Image (tube, grey):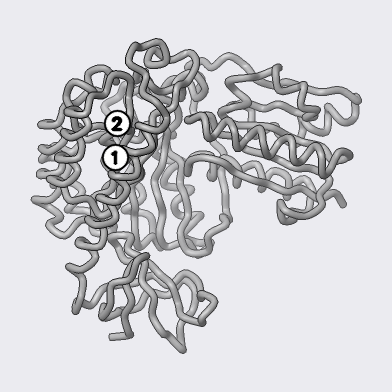
Amino acid sequence: MQTVAFHTLGCKVNQYDTQAMLEKFKAAGYTVVPFDGPADVYVLNTCTVTGTGDKKSMQLTRRLRRQSPNSELVLCGCLAQRMGAELLSTGARLILGTQRRAEVVELLEQAVREGKQICAVEALTQAPFESLTITEQEEHTRAILKIQEGCNNHCTYCIIPSVRGPIRSRLLAEIRTEAERLAAAGFTELVLTGIHLSSYGRDLQDGTTLLDAISQVQAAEGVRRIRLGSLEPTIATPEFASALRQMDKVCPQFHLALQSGSDTVLARMARRYNSRMYLTGVENLRREFPEAAFTTDVLTGFPGETEAEYEETRAMIARVGFAKIHVFPYSQRAGTKAAQMPGQLSNAEKERRARELIALGETMGRQYRERFLGRTVEVLLEEQDTAGEWVGYTREYLRVEVHCPEGAQGQYRQVEICEVTDEGLRGHLA
């Protein structure tokens, strides 16, 4: 029996796609083995959202070719979609982009049988949502449920629309069915994700919106928590926030994409909101979820970003009071408008600004966690650490350590918080 190993770079959507391909291989009789050991087939799901994603993808590819020259290599995902046939020079047996993932086993075995390489990267079209289904995931208590693919926004710095294509939405009935299937498999917390989640339903042209998709999961028996992926701030209208509040499974943790707190930078990025609109979205959600955790992504050193514009972003971040921020120095992506813009900043300057914002984010995160001292919160136990303590997460996605002699993976426990740590919180059973 042949063995296959998987490695995923990039976002939760990629993680979902990898798991779907893994199940295709298992159904075909392959045995899944760890990526850092020997395997007959290696599947690398690549990322190209930043230069770092490109670099990591190619480094892993070269390492695999050196260490396992006789193994078959499948390169798939966003970098494979962008580079296509260029990657045949790596010696990979199959290049598979962001489509035809359901055919991965058949295409690989065809290439091996015919003794050739296959590049199955096709032009992205307004094809229907590729309905891959999964029943198991790497995490044992939380599962990713992909409901949307593609993006139509074409922000000036972003390569993703060209490698993921236009928006495609999963049908509501399929969402409900997979939510129930995952719940039956033991996953009581589901994370709804997509390339541009807020655009869910627009391509269906029948009035369906993201709220309809969330409602399907809310109604699925066995689901206890619903966590939302990244949202555009403009979706957070008073009506949207109120509707979420009526669904008791929705977790009070919202990832609202920021990128910059400067209106002039946002305009150069071609983002579809300004700082006022962003703050309004936060206020609408906080009105319904006063203790919600807000997280975000920030891009530093965008072309032409002045020190004043950077300070506007710092001030914006401080005003919102995020529980966590992900900071990325701007990375030039060939084929995007921003790559040709004047005023490209030095790597040193981009890194300096990123370090400062990371430090600010860490301070804010600790301040947010301190609000939970003395409170009793619901924690979903996930795993034991090396010291034997159980680690789990609150509805706000705060990491909690707790001594729980009767603890078991997947159980919900009430925990009284007594300490704030660098990584999260610590408490004892209530």
| Residue 285 in the image: above or below residue 124 | below
Q: Tag 1, which secondary structure?
A: helix
Image quadrant holding the C terminus, namely: bottom left
Q: Quadrant of residue 340?
A: top left
Whether tag 2 and tag 1 are in contact, CB under 8 A, the answer is yes
Q: Quadrant of residue 308?
A: top left
Tell me, yes or no, if residue 153 can be seen here.
no
Q: Residues within 10 Å of mark 1 (few under 14, many from 20)?
A: some
Q: CA distance from mark 2 to mark 1?
A: 6 Å
Image position of 126 (left or right of 210): right
Q: Residues within 10 Å of mark 2 (few under 14, many from 20)?
A: some
| Frontmost residue, 179 versus 250 | 250
What residue did someone put label 1 on? 212
- In the image, what residue type sits under mark 2? Thr
Give me the disc on residue 208. Answer: 2
Tell me which residue sits at (66%, 48%) in the image.
23
Tell me, yes or no, if residue 181 can be seen here.
yes
- The image shows residue 304 at horizontal and vertical percentages of 28, 19
| Frontmost residue, 96 versus 51 | 51
| Frontmost residue, 176 versus 373 | 373
| Residue 342 in the image: above or below residue 424 | above
